[in-house]
Image (cartoon, coloured by chain):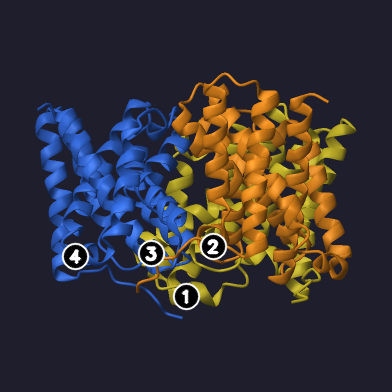
Chain colours: A blue, B orange, C yellow
């Protein structure tokens, strides 16, 4: 198993997790079947799409690789059918979501570097890839995006993106740099979920 | 009258209908004249714009053909001036909206095929062209998008896009394939409006 | 000081003002530090980003010039730290916001002309550059965009864009055309702020 296969696998696990979590939210909001499919799609490939649009990196990945949409639609339909069973494992599903957060960050950083952007922009694109799906999902569902006020999510992605860039700058092989980055992001995120951590908020209205 | 002229005419009818419906919503929401113009524009060319951005299909159609914005601005201004008269015909206006739904779907499918994307992506782009204008309109107006929870709208577009692709795959001439597709979408949509049909929703909170 | 340096300076003043105003709103909404950074970024470079995406004008300006993001992040962090002091000067800050409105409009018009679009589209892009940052900021914060219903904001941008195009059409040098345009937009905006002017709204629900 090469390091590219590992990232691709973790990416698809993350896509599936985001699609499922998006479907649960869409069902709670009373959307119909196409509403659920759309939210599942936006939640899972929205971040990568915003990144590719900003970087002018065409064709956008899910337009030329049908695996993404197929995985998303299958997850959305399964969530519609087995809703009562799936919400029982909603919290455990966060493990897969944290895997996605890790993979999305690494992919976002790498796509920016491949397109000759600076390390500074690469960090921004790692975080963008990891967070904009959830942001757009919440905007369409008419909620203030969760990742912007309640969770250690962007923090984990940002720290991971920084570590990855330092490791690559030190000429550490990707076979070593990726596992370190992925486990750091995953570890921070799961610790935060487990302890119900959030960043300080500044509501001083 | 060629088949291209027919599609262009139906497209402009749809643009006018979406601009008018968007203006009515914006006026109800208490927006000022520029708010009404913006909502009218987003509602009518927003779907095609998202499609062109995703497919990297530049220049975006309304940037190089002023007819679109002129039709939109005229409709928005007429709606502002004759608001009381126009809301009386709000339901009949849905006939024109259904014409737009049909034309937008056909155009979305064709633009994707022209840009060498797969039939699967072409269906997605037909639906995107037909639905994202309404979705963005509702997001800006701070409402959960109507087409995602209340109406047989995406369904009609999806079925029509599928039929068009099957007909084109069978080498049926566009002079025959287009009218069949257009009347199928229009028929499904108007039947749904007439009977007040919606898809089952899954609010199981 | 060349006319380009002037515009660049005013642009950065506007970026700083939009980032600060965006941060204040994000803090009021109870967002965490990354939520505040994101809203500050979207509010200040969102309009130019939408313009560049629509016009296919790549690379997007803030991806290749780090000054923008640095100014934004510094303003956001200062607002987080000195919140109590900064909200006391919230109204005076509108002077800088009006400077930004002027500069963004001029830049939007020029980018569209440079990319060979028509004067009609150039006006639209001037207004887009000046207004879409605030629109997206309010959408993420789950509010109906302020510039669409409460303020003489788009009006000032539109009048300024029109005047600039007329002056350029008359072959007036940019050294003269820019100051006239900038002071017109600034004057209209500040007069509106001072007198608390708004456009008539049409809420006829």
- Nearest the viewer among A200 and B110 is B110
Residue occupying image coordinates x 50% and y 53%: C42
Residue occupying image coordinates x 59% and y 58%: C135
State the CA–CA distance, disc 3 to disc 1.
44 Å
Is residue C186 positioned above or below A45 on the image?
below
Residue occupying image coordinates x 53% and y 56%: C43
Is residue B55 positioned above or below A24 on the image?
above
Is residue B7 positioned above or below A195 on the image?
above
SS category of the residue bearing label 3:
helix
Q: Residues within 10 Å of mark 1 (few under 14, many from 20)?
A: few
Q: Quadrant of the N terminus of chain B?
A: top right
What is the x, y in percent for residue A19? 32, 51
**Label 1: which residue?**
C85
Q: Nearer the viewer, mark 3 or mark 1?
A: 3
Left-right relation of A199 to B179: left
Left-right relation of A161 to B82: left
Q: Nearer the viewer, mark 3 or mark 2?
A: 2
State the CA–CA distance, disc 4 to disc 1.
41 Å
- Nearest the viewer among B94 and C129 is B94
- Residue B56 seen from this side: no
SS category of the residue bearing label 1:
helix
Label 3 is found on which chain of the structure?
Answer: A
- Residue A182 seen from this side: yes
Q: Nearer the viewer, mark 4 or mark 3?
A: 3
SS category of the residue bearing label 4:
loop
- Whether discs 4 and 3 lie on one chain: the answer is yes
**Label 2: which residue?**
B198
- Whether discs 3 and 2 lie on one chain: the answer is no
**Label 3: which residue?**
A27
State the CA–CA distance, disc 2 to disc 1.
53 Å
What is the x, y in percent for residue A38? 44, 51
Label 2 is found on which chain of the structure?
Answer: B
């Amino acid at each position: 198993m090469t390091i590219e296969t590992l990232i691709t696998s973790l990416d698809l696990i993350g896509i599936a997790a985001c699609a499922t979590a998006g479907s649960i939210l869409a069902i709670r909001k009373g959307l119909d079947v196409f509403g659920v499919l759309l939210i599942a799609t936006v939640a899972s490939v929205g971040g990568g799409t915003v990144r590719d649009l900003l970087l002018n990196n065409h064709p956008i990945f899910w337009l030329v690789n049908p695996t993404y949409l197929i995985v998303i639609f299958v997850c959305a339909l399964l969530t519609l059918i087995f809703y009562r069973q799936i919400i029982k494992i909603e919290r455990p599903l966060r493990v897969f979501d944290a895997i996605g957060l890790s993979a999305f960050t690494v992919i976002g950083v790498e796509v920016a570097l491949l397109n000759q952007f600076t390390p500074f922009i690469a960090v921004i694109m790692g975080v963008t890839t990891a967070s904009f799906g959830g942001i757009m999902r919440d905007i369409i569902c008419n909620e203030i995006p969760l990742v912007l006020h309640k969770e250690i999510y962007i923090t984990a992605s940002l720290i991971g993106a920084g570590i990855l860039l330092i490791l690559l700058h030190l000429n550490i092989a990707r076979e070593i740099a990726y596992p370190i980055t992925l486990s750091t992001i995953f570890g921070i995120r799961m610790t935060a979920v487990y302890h119900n951590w959030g960043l300080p908020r500044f509501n001083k209205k």
